[in-house]
Amino acid sequence: MDVINGLLSFYYGFIFASVISFARLFTNRCQLAFYEKSRKKIIHKWKFILSGRSRCDHCSEIIPVLYLVPVFGYLFALGKCTNCHNKISLIYFLEESMAFVYGSAYFIFARFQYLHYHISVWFMILYFFLCYFISRMDYRYFLIPTGAIVSILFLAVLELVFVIKPDHLLLISVIPLTWFCFLYLLGYAFPEKLGMADIHFIPVLCLAIHFPHSLYLPAVASFIAIIYFFLRYRHEKWKDSRHNKIPFGVFLSLAFLLLKIIP
Ligand SMILES: [Zn+2]
């Protein structure tokens, strides 16, 4: 890999880390504005979500720009708020670091895989944002906002038409449609077990991931879910409500991100 592509890989890693940092703030504020008890007090919801700087979780002081730099901001601040000296959650740092590695790796992958690789990376950035948002929402409330599913559908169609330009459009669309019909029947037979959002989300992700990965996506997601539950059960017994419900959107998103980087 030459120097320019090395720098570009670093640049895209940095963009992905910035995106996850923004997605975290966006998700937290969406939860406060639409789903938590505080929603009644927030009148101008979108103004609340999209404006205003990041604040410390403990003292609510505005975080200086230097410490907002993804990955490095945490290191500069030595993992503590510079105002109240309380610890900043390590999760923030880990999320940003993983996004950085993923973004760098995805650029290298896309360069070999696609002709218009820069455009592919920008599509992936948007998918990445939406997958993070969906995962957090599904994990907390067991729901996937329809707007997020429609956004992924919109992106998938745009990418197919303008970037991928597949020869076999039928093959690309047949698998998501088959999944949709199969899941719809399954949902009809077991209405308690499968959420309507999952029935819509799986075919949309299959369309976004293209053939042949669309064949494996639900299986890979289930496999990740099984590993996760196995590890989790070893550590703690979940509350009763959690025994019946599975935030499958989280595992679907993970499987999507994983399969996107496999040739
Ligand atoms: Zn603080």
Image: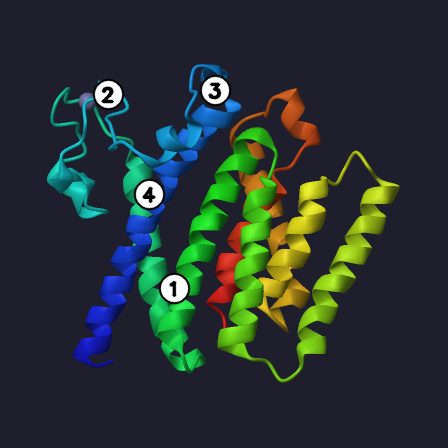
Residue 92 image-quadrant placement? top left
**Label 4: which residue?**
22
- For residue 212, say whether it is visible: yes
| Tag 4 and tag 3, C-beta contact below 8 Å | no
| Tag 2 and tag 1, C-beta contact below 8 Å | no
The residue at the point 23 percent across, 64 percent down is 10
Distance, label 4 to label 3, CA atoms, is: 20 Å
Name the amino acid, label 2. Answer: Ser
Name the amino acid, label 4. Answer: Phe
Q: Mark 4 packing: few (<14 Cα in 10 Å), some, or many (20+)?
A: some
Is the shortest distance between ligand 1 and the CB of mark 2 under 8 Å? Answer: yes
The residue at the point 67 percent across, 43 percent down is 197
Q: Earlier in the sequence, mark 1 or mark 4?
A: 4
Name the amino acid, label 1. Answer: Trp
Disc 2 secondary structure class: loop
Q: Earlier in the sequence, mark 4 or mark 3?
A: 4
On the image, the x and y values in percent for residue 128 come to 44, 54
Distance, label 2 to label 1, CA atoms, is: 33 Å
Residue 75 image-quadrant placement? top left
**Label 3: which residue?**
39
Disc 4 secondary structure class: helix
- For residue 252, say whether it is visible: no
**Label 1: which residue?**
122
Name the amino acid, label 3. Answer: Arg
| Tag 1 and tag 3, C-beta contact below 8 Å | no
| Tag 3 and tag 2, C-beta contact below 8 Å | no
On the image, the x and y values in percent for residue 219 come to 66, 57
Is the shortest distance between ligand 1 and the CB of mark 4 under 8 Å? Answer: no
Q: Which mark is residue 60?
A: 2
Distance, label 3 to label 2, CA atoms, is: 19 Å
